[in-house]
Image: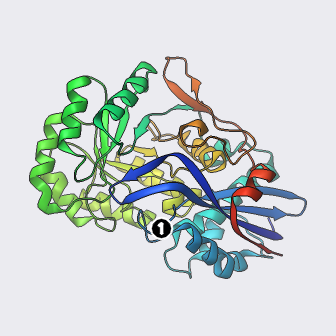
Amino acid sequence: MRIDRIELFHVAMPLIYPWKTAYGEDVACHSVLCRLTSGSVHAWGESAPLTAPCYSPEWGGGIFQCAKEWLAPALLGREIPSGYALQEHLAVYKGNPFAKALLDTAWWNLQSRLTNTPLHRLLGATRGEVTVGADFGVMDSFDDLLTAIDGAVAARFPRVKLKFRPGWDIPMLTAVRKRFPDPVFHIDCNSGYRLDDLSLFQQIDEFRLAMIEQPLPHDDLLDHAQLQSKIRTPVCLDESVTHPRHVVQAIAQKSCQYVNVKPGRVGGLTNAVKIKNLCQQAGIPSWVGGMLESALGAGLCVSLAMLDNFTYPADIFPSSRFYHEDLCERPLELIRLADGTPGVKAEPTPEPHSGRLEKLCVERARLG
């Protein structure tokens, strides 16, 4: 396809409840949307690195500028026959996976429309629905958290993910396991700890968790390998994997037993599929995570999650979980799967509502 026009929109979407993690707190999700046009056909992509460079070195305002000044001009007017070709065109620019994902996801969505092929099929999926889990950040009290988990268990979510940080750690897990001895839980540390905290993680072994997600620094693989060798609970890498090369290194060093794959964090759907394939070949299960995206970005994650080897329930949420009103015309909603668990089904990726996009837009640019 030839890229004839690229439009960029930096938006700030207010959250219902502040999202608190080991790296800080977000009261709004800062995301960047891209509308890519080829001829008379257009499609959207989204990348949501959040407000500040705390989850990763990137942030909403930064990826908007990077895409506007460098990445989008590198693609404008060119024939881009594949996602791999797009990545090659952008490879001269070091890092910036969230900014690259903005254009990569839009390319895949546009290719889906141009070929009249559902996105999940275009990516290689053989199924049309997938189960999802529940996810809770740091809350104001244990009572609030336990009430929220009560709802998730009653709704038959197959697993629950809990944010974990200093001050919201072992006592929180103790309260949760006391109330809920049997359900599947895992914790997400968001790089909040160091290898010196080994004794803490050895205590965590007693809580029978499915995994510990990203316990150590965001750019580390070596210390994660040491930690994994000294604890029973599986380690899952998240922030440490921003490129397929990192998965190759993690596999070689035995840094983890799971990999969380977020299209934004790894540079787009092209790299996400490659990472999934590498994990599958190594016998490492993977699962799809989210970044509080609108129904647009979440819909892209839904299509990715349909692929084989994404076996652990995904972090994909209904729009009502975070937003009073989604940015898109059609919100993302969960369905009840045949086994009674909550899930999502493959649907065409929704588009932004023009009025809401105008209201929430912080800055915009148009090229071509």
What residue sits 77% from the left and 69% below the top? Answer: 6
Judged left or right of residue 229, residue 249 is right
User: Going by the picture, which residue comes out furthest to the front?
Assistant: 140
Residue type at tag 1:
Ala
Disc 1 crowd, CA 10 A, few/some/many (<14, 14-19, 20+): some
Residue 181 visible in this rendered orientation of the protein: no
Relative to 349, does residue 342 appear above or below in the rendering?
above
Question: Where does residue 274 sit, x and y in percent of width and height?
Answer: 50, 57
What residue sits 44% from the left and 50% below the top? Answer: 19
Q: Nearer the viewer, residue 81 or 301?
A: 301
What residue sits 54% from the left and 65% below the top? Answer: 98
Q: Which of 219 and 64 is in front in this view?
A: 64
Question: Where does residue 218 sit, x and y in percent of width and height?
Answer: 33, 65
What residue sits 23% from the left and 39% below the top? Answer: 172
What element does badge 1 sit on? loop
Quarter containing the C terminus: bottom right
Judged left or right of residue 153, residue 211 is left
User: Going by the picture, which residue comes out furthest to the left?
Assistant: 199
Q: Nearer the viewer, residue 288 or 248?
A: 288
Judged left or right of residue 218, residue 319 is right
Residue 351 visible in this rendered orientation of the protein: yes
Residue occupied by mark 1: 52
